[in-house]
Amino acid sequence: MTAQSAIHELKQVRQYCSARAIPAIDYAIQVLQGLAEREKRVEEAKQANPQSPQDPAEAFPD
């Protein structure tokens, strides 16, 4: 499962969860959006320089 698909599913769950749970769902969505953005940058780095010996994830520190 990708971060994008998890975000989609959490947005669906959010529609049916209790009001008390909405902040936790929103927080999880924000975290996964950050992860999705990082995954996107890593993929772009791989495509831009496929011969790079360095792990692309290391090029984008947390």
Image: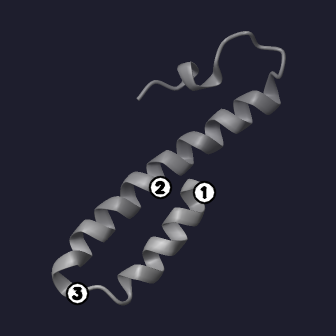
Instruction: Give amino acid for label 2.
Output: Gln
Q: Is residue 31 above or below residue 58?
A: below
Which residue position holds label 3? 18
Q: Amino acid at mark 3?
A: Ser
The structure's colour scheme is one colour
Alpha-carbon distance for marks 1 and 2?
Answer: 14 Å
Q: Nearer the viewer, mark 1 or mark 2?
A: 1
Question: Upstream in the sequence, badge 1 or badge 3?
Answer: 1
- What mark, if any, has residue 11 been given in the picture? none
Judged left or right of residue 43, residue 41 is left
Residue at 72 percent across and 36 percent down: it is 44
Q: Nearer the viewer, residue 5 or 37?
A: 5
Q: Is residue 47 above or below residue 14?
A: above
Above or below — where is 14 with respect to 25? below
Name the residue: 54% across, 72% down: 8
Observer-side mark, 3 or 2, equals 3
